[in-house]
Image: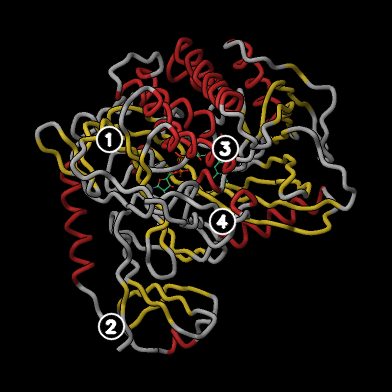
């Protein structure tokens, strides 16, 4: 059956320029109920689609399910730099994983980069892929030390780097590095092309299919009406309570796309070394050249996103003469506790359930390389990076299983204890278009008043682990400060690890 459907929306109130394009029509692909697939891939971002394509092309019968649609998650909100270096420096990797670990990490990043380029070439993808020089600069003596450390670490693993004599930035700096051979692209044009190649190869795609629970019978995984011998969680963060809630911290990151009065845009990828950092690059979107300025990352639910946007705009205006701000958006990524992503067999899960998470801000390369590792694991092939990124590499913390049980109970109880609300004074003070945690009859309520004055009231208890969500006025979402789950104004899950919506509270 082929019906037209629209894609995909995104996980927040602000569109990225990648998502600002005509709706793409999708084939409606339903699973063949009696078929046992070789692999169910959950999540249609760069990780899931790359893995699905690799497996399908290798002759496996696969199905990809996404809770919303292809590109709904962070891949639709990325800034799409393709680098030979990463947020975790090679020296940092060396001190935690040894010389061999640092070399493997550098090789893995290079392989992710090569995989993207190979897809662009082989599938003739028109996704604005361009090679660019990359500059990293230091503004203080402390940052100069960091820069020298980055230089030394990159040199040891053979990543091409040199000190730069000039950087195309108006920001005064003390010292800078030049990484040649970086790249950029339009992530959703790339993703759509992978999707078409996947469907052409016989892959099946299920959109609007959230995987909440899985079953296991006679070596077969059961999820979302699909039966499969293997499963991959390519959901950026695996759903529900899992060890990665303790091993990865969710961060929000902000981007502006602006027009410059001068009409002159830097032809490079440029990064500072501040904490939190800033970066710029240029991209022609819908025929219009734009400067992308990003950074100011913070832990999800811990700071005011509207202030982060305001600070980013102030920073941009300090250095650039802006004629207009065309886009502003934010998205989420996960920082792994030891600096490297977790890729492989999912800890505490049935054999044959795989996952990939903790890419930091480097998911274009690491998501691609993760797809290669997971495709090899599903196919029973060795992969030289599997050991380094082993998802079970940290011993499980004592009492973890008990924690899971207790939290499952907590969440169930909250959902069962629904109550109704009435328009109290604190609710009356809520302005249209804003949200707030308010107290009604001694109970906390997550309340949003829409432009028509209607209050959307929710139980603020995150359905993942029982924390209380915070209002994100910039993306009009409820964000959990504990593990990064996010919900829209009606409580619908936008970002895992939650799989169940916030309970709505009705007006009495
Ligand atoms: C602002 C920002 C800028 C960045 N810039 C860069 C950059 O320049 N270069 C770089 O390399 N990396 C960058 N990153 C990181 C990179 O974008 C991400 O690591 C990468 O996009 C993650 O891809 P993914 O496929 O793993 O996850 P996602 O793209 O998030 O896809 C996950 C998918 O899973 C689906 N899903 C989730 N739960 C379920 C469920 N239970 N059932 C079914 N489906 C589910 C979602 O709907 C979503 O479509 C950036 C990140 C941010 C936040």
Task: Give the structural element (helix, strand or loop) at label 4.
Answer: loop
Residue 190: mark: 3
Task: Give the structural element (helix, strand or loop) at label 3.
Answer: helix
Q: Earlier in the sequence, mark 2 or mark 1?
A: 1
Residue at mark 1: 231
> Marks 2 and 1: CB-CB under 8 Å?
no
* Residue 311 visible in image: yes
* Quadrant location of the C terminus in the rendered image: bottom left
What is the CA distance from the residue labelled 4 to the residue labelled 2? 39 Å
Residue at mark 4: 23
Is ligand 1 less than 8 Å from the beta carbon at label 1? no
> Marks 4 and 2: CB-CB under 8 Å?
no
Q: Earlier in the sequence, mark 4 or mark 3?
A: 4
Camera-nearest residue between 278 and 70: 70
Callout 2: 10 Å neighbours few (<14), some, many (20+)?
A: some
> Marks 4 and 3: CB-CB under 8 Å?
no
Camera-nearest residue between 122 and 190: 122
Callout 3: 10 Å neighbours few (<14), some, many (20+)?
A: many
Which residue is depicted at the point 61% across and 33% down?
A: 125
Q: Earlier in the sequence, mark 4 or mark 2?
A: 4
Residue 420: mark: 2
* Residue 482 visible in image: no
Q: Nearer the viewer's eye, disc 1 or disc 3? A: 3
Image coords of residue 141 (percent x, y): 73, 30
Image check: 261 left or right of 102?
A: right
Is ligand 1 less than 8 Å from the beta carbon at label 3? no
Which residue is depicted at the point 60% across and 24% down?
A: 117
Task: Give the structural element (helix, strand or loop) at label 1.
Answer: strand
Task: Give the structural element (helix, strand or loop) at label 2.
Answer: loop
Camera-nearest residue between 53 and 394: 53
> Marks 3 and 2: CB-CB under 8 Å?
no
Is ligand 1 less than 8 Å from the beta carbon at label 4? no
């Amino acid at each position: 059956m082929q019906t037209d459907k629209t894609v995909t929306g995104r996980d927040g109130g602000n569109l990225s320029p990648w998502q600002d394009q005509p709706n793409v029509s999708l084939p409606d692909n339903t699973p063949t109920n009696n078929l046992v697939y070789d692999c169910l891939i959950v999540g249609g971002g760069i990780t899931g689609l790359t893995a699905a394509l690799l497996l399908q092309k290798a002759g496996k019968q696969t199905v990809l399910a996404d809770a919303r649609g292809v590109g709904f998650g962070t891949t639709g909100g990325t800034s799409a730099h393709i680098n030979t270096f990463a947020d975790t420096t090679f020296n940092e990797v060396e001190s935690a994983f040894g010389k061999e670990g640092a070399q493997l990490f550098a090789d893995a990043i290079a392989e992710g980069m090569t995989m993207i380029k190979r897809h662009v070439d082989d599938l003739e993808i028109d996704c604005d892929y361009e090679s660019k020089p990359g500059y990293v600069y230091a503004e203080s003596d402390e940052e100069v030390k960091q820069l020298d450390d980055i230089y030394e670490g990159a040199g040891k693993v053979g990543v091409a780097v040199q000190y730069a004599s000039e950087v195309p930035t108006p920001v005064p700096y003390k010292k800078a590095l030049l990484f040649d051979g970086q790249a950029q692209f339009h992530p959703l044009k790339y993703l759509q092309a992978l999707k078409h190649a996947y469907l052409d190869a016989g892959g099946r795609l299920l959109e609007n299919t959230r995987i909440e629970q899985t079953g296991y019978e006679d070596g077969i995984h059961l999820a979302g009406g699909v039966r499969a011998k293997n499963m991959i969680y390519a959901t950026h963060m695996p759903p529900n309570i899992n060890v990665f809630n303790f091993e990865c911290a969710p961060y929000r990151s902000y981007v502006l796309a602006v027009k410059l009065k001068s009409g002159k845009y830097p032809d490079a990828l440029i990064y500072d070394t501040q904490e939190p950092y800033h970066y710029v690059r240029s991209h022609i979107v819908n025929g219009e050249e734009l400067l992308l300025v990003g950074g100011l990352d913070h832990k999800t639910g811990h700071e005011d996103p509207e202030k982060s946007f305001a600070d980013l705009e102030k920073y941009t205006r300090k250095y650039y003469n802006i004629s207009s701000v065309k886009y502003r958006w934010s998205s989420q990524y996960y920082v792994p506790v030891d600096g490297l992503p977790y890729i492989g067999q999912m800890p505490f899960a049935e054999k044959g359930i795989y996952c990939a998470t903790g890419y930091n801000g480097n998911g274009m390369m690491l998501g691609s390389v993760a797809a290669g590792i997971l495709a090899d694991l599903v196919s029973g092939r060795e992969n030289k990076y599997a050991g380094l990124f082993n998802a079970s590499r940290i011993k499980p913390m004592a009492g973890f299983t008990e924690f899971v049980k207790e939290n499952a109970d907590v969440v169930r109880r909250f959902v069962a204890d629904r109550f109704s609300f009435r328009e109290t004074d604190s609710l009356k003070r809520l302005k249209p278009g804003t949200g707030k945690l308010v107290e009604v009859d001694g109970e906390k309520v997550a309340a949003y008043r829409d432009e028509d004055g209607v209050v959307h009231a929710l139980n603020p208890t995150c359905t993942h682990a029982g924390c209380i969500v915070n209002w994100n006025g910039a993306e009009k979402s409820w964000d959990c400060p504990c593990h990064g789950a996010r919900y829209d104004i009606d409580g619908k899950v936008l970002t895992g690890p939650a799989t169940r919506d916030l309970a709505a509270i009705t007006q009495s």
